[in-house]
Amino acid sequence: MFVRILSFALRGVEALPVAVEVDVSPGIPFFEVVGLPDASVRESRERVRAALKNGGWALPPLRITVNLAPAHLRKAGPGFDLAIALGLLVATGQVPAGLLDGIGVVGELALDGSLRPVEGALVMAWTAQQIGLAGFLVSRHSAAEAAAAGGKVWGASDLGEVVSHLVGTAPLPPASPRRAEDTVAVGPDLADVRGQAVGRRALEVSAAGGHNLLIL
């Protein structure tokens, strides 16, 4: 059976849509990931195997091919784990087909099936809106960041919660963006500096990006 699920790859500060295509067929068992993946993406095979097993799902001994399209775009990072796992569950008939239509999926799986945070959740969720997706599924650790882009975002703790949400047995609540806590200024405030526009801008960029700074 063939399944396609939409995920995202980071390129600089952009998020690019990636179709995670999963094909499962009879034959000599193997599990191959193609589509210009780096080492962390290829290693998703072992993370996904363990997460499915420890979550109580079966992974039959079949020929499994995962293609990350477009193939010319280099794929990096573990954020495709969740899409691959869900694709396998649908392709093997353990989750009904069609439940992920119009939904973007990003998440790194731990071996026990729990979901870890991913980089770039905000820009991925924003891109999901721009291409007309109805929602975005991500780890609960990244849900508040993704929700800051607007749109419908769900955050899950593990693969089981994602499946329960999709089949409707335990829907996840939409995530809300994190609110900045009220803080009391201590010491000098950069807003009190008059003039020195270039120096203030350098300080702001350095603080925002966590960069080193030398002023002469």
Image: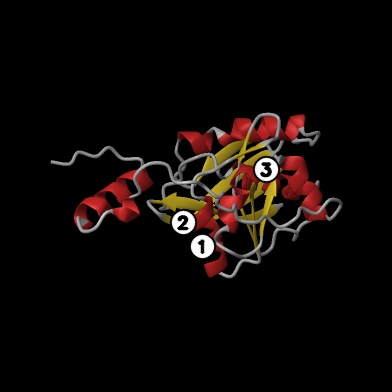
Camera-nearest label, 2 or 3:
2
Q: Is residue 144 left or right of residue 209?
A: right
Q: Position of residue 150 (x, y in %)?
A: 59, 64
Q: Residues within 10 Å of mark 1 (few under 14, many from 20)?
A: some
| Type of the residue with mark 2 | Ala
The reply to whether dot 1 and dot 2 touch (C-beta < 8 Å) is yes
- Residue 85: give its label: 3
Q: Is residue 181 left or right of residue 194?
A: right
What is the C-alpha distance between the residues marked 3 and 1?
22 Å
Q: Secondary structure at mark 1?
A: helix
The reply to whether dot 2 and dot 3 touch (C-beta < 8 Å) is no
- The foreground one among 69 and 173 is 173
Q: Secondary structure at mark 2?
A: strand
Q: Is residue 81 left or right of residue 127?
A: right
What is the C-alpha distance between the residues marked 1 and 2?
6 Å
Q: Residue at x 81, y 48 (%)?
A: 164
Q: Answer yes or no: is residue 47 visible.
A: yes
| Type of the residue with mark 3 | Ala
- The foreground one among 46 and 1 is 46
> Which residue has dot 2 on it?
15
Q: Position of residue 67 (x, y in %)?
A: 55, 49
Q: Quadrant of the C terminus?
A: top left
Which of marks 2 and 1 precedes in the sequence?
2
Q: Answer yes or no: is residue 92 visible.
A: no
> Which residue has dot 1 on it?
127
- The foreground one among 196 and 198 is 196
- Residue 47: give its label: none
| Type of the residue with mark 1 | Thr
Which of marks 3 and 2 precedes in the sequence?
2
